[in-house]
């Protein structure tokens, strides 16, 4: 009788356990996320949010535009983000989601096609993160609940140069694509519509970009020449790593969704006004609007970093162009373009890193930049004020790249830090002792949530100073 009782109990336990698993499974909640859905989300979320960040906070740092109000950031109090200025969580959320894609691609042969794009996106986002902040959590980060929630900070040099870093992931991403022999298509790809060759060109253009970024620290000439000789990089606007915004919500450019008063907070900067005016550059009409109080259809820029308490009238300065509000269907989220690639190669040729014609690369970059912004190139533009040899050729190359990157303001600021061009201005009412910042500060939430590691990183940057150069920056 005792044995019969034990058997009955065992049967009840087995039966209940089986039913329990079935009853407590939410059939509407997938056990694993599809990498196609996550890839689409990472590309769109990162591109959409960083386009907004780059055009608000980034464009203030790069002196493309000036803020009339809510302008502590424009006055270089970078620890007080207002309408933008805290890209840290955008990077980490999307890097964590991208890591899920990468893990799935390695754990399940059916998802192998996602490994290359996931590695390339990891390199792209990691470079953007470290170029803004310097040393950041990397090798122990992006793991969610599976690893430490207080990751240590990696040096920028190791993030770029070590195994598992930026260059390594670009190389492994290309190799994964080249070695992929499956028949499953890449889905969720809103950059290249599943074209793996497009991802390879994207990766090679990023290699060019990041090799130039570290060129003051590393001998990059052999690698650059190999890339040029191979020629498999983004070479035409039709190959750009971009996705299009729409005119209406929900996929319009974020500035179009702001209240009109917030949109009107941004006006043409004096820096951009002077550069475009001196070049007689018609792109000013695409990027900005004539100021309301003008009498001749003219444009007027304002020096960055005004003291908002002094009071200025928006009618006296040029607002941003309609492409950023009414006509955002003409605008892209810009990851990497042919024009930027050609300007980088023009710089490489000018500095003797590659055997190529600087003039041809420079002219191609400008021609593609005008086409990108849908503005007709004046017949004499390349031979008159914007001629490569009109002044310092290197300054001309970087300045043209700076103009072309008007939706990627952080890029303009980063390249200014690397090259010193274009020559940005001392701002009006600086809260940083008239110094132009050369890194973003770690955010307050990092001090609160990762205090021990934050404190070490803060000590290494003179108390989280915005005036301490990152590794590749030879100040």
Image (cartoon, grey):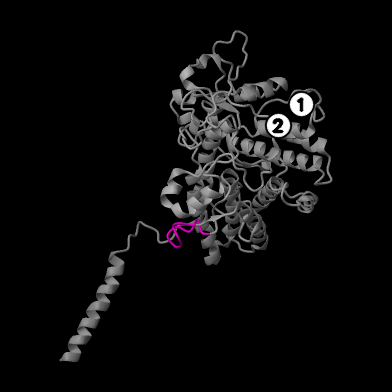
| Marks 1 and 2, the one that precedes in the sequence | 1
Q: Name the residue under label 1.
A: 386
Location of residue 407 in the rendering, given as x and y in whole percent from the top left corner? 59, 34
Are there few (<14), some (14-19), or many (20+) residues within 10 Å of tag 2? many
Q: Is residue 35 left or right of residue 362?
A: left
Counting every numbered tag in the picture gives 2
Q: Is residue 285 left or right of residue 149?
A: right
User: Is 198 placed above or below 403 here?
Assistant: below
- Which residue is found at the position 81% from the left and 38% from the top? 358
Q: Is residue 417 visible?
A: yes
Q: Give the range drawn in magenta.
A: 140-151
* Secondary structure found at label 2: helix
Magenta stretch secondary structure, dominant? loop
Structural distance between the alpha carbons of marks 1 and 2: 10 Å
Regarding mark 1 in the picture, which secondary structure is present there? loop
Vertical relation: 303 (above or below) 3: above
Query: What residue appears at the point 78 percent right and 48 percent down from the top-left corner?
Result: 228
Residue 380, by quadrant, is top right
Q: Which mark is residue 399?
A: 2
Vertical side of 159 occupied by 67: above or below: above
Tell me the residue at 55%/59% (across/down).
139
Relative side of 304 to 210, left or right: left
Q: Position of residue 102 (x, y in %)?
A: 54, 59
């Amino acid at each position: 009788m005792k044995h019969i009782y034990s058997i009955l109990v065992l049967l009840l336990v087995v039966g209940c356990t089986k039913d329990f698993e079935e009853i407590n499974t939410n059939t509407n909640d997938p056990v694993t996320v599809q990498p196609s859905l996550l890839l689409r989300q990472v590309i769109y979320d990162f591109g959409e949010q960083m386009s907004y960040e780059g055009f608000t906070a980034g464009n203030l740092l790069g002196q493309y535009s000036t803020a009339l109000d809510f302008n502590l950031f424009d006055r270089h109090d970078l620890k007080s983000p207002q309408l933008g200025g805290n890209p840290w969580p955008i990077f980490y959320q999307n890097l964590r989601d991208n890591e899920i894609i990468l893990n799935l691609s390695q754990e399940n042969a059916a998802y192998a096609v996602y490994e290359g794009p996931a590695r390339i996106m990891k390199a792209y986002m990691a470079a953007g993160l470290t170029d803004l902040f310097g040393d950041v959590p990397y090798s122990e980060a992006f793991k969610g609940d599976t690893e430490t929630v207080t990751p240590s900070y990696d040096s920028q040099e190791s993030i770029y140069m070590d195994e598992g870093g930026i260059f390594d992931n670009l190389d492994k991403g290309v190799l994964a694509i080249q070695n992929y022999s499956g028949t499953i298509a890449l889905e969720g790809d809103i950059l290249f519509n599943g074209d793996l060759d497009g991802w390879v060109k994207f990766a090679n253009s990023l290699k060019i970009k990041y090799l130039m970024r570290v060129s003051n620290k590393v001998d990059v000439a052999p690698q650059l020449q190999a890339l040029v000789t191979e020629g498999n990089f983004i070479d035409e606007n039709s190959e750009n790593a971009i996705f299009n915004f729409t005119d209406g919500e929900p996929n319009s450019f974020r500035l179009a969704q702001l209240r009109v008063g917030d949109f009107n907070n941004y006006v043409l900067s004096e820096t951009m006004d002077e550069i475009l005016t001196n070049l007689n550059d018609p792109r000013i009409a695409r990027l900005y609007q004539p100021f309301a109080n003008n009498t001749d259809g003219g444009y007027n820029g304002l020096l960055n970093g005004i003291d908002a308490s002094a009071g200025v009238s928006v009618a006296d300065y040029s607002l941003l162009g309609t492409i950023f509000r009414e006509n955002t269907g003409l605008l892209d989220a810009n990851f990497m373009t042919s024009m930027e690639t050609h300007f980088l190669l023009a710089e490489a040729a000018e500095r003797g890193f590659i055997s190529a014609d600087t003039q041809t690369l420079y002219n191609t970059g400008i021609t593609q930049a005008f086409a990108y912004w849908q503005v007709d190139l004046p017949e004499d533009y390349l031979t008159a004020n914007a001629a490569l040899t009109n002044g310092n050729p290197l300054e001309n190359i970087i300045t043209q790249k700076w103009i072309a990157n008007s939706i990627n303001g952080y890029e303009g600021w980063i390249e200014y830090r690397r090259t010193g061009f274009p020559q940005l201005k001392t701002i009006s009412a600086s809260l940083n002792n008239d110094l132009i910042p050369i890194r973003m500060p770690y955010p307050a939430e990092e001090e609160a949530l990762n205090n021990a590691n934050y404190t070490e990183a803060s000590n290494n940057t003179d108390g989280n100073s915005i005036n301490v150069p990152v590794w590749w920056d030879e100040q």
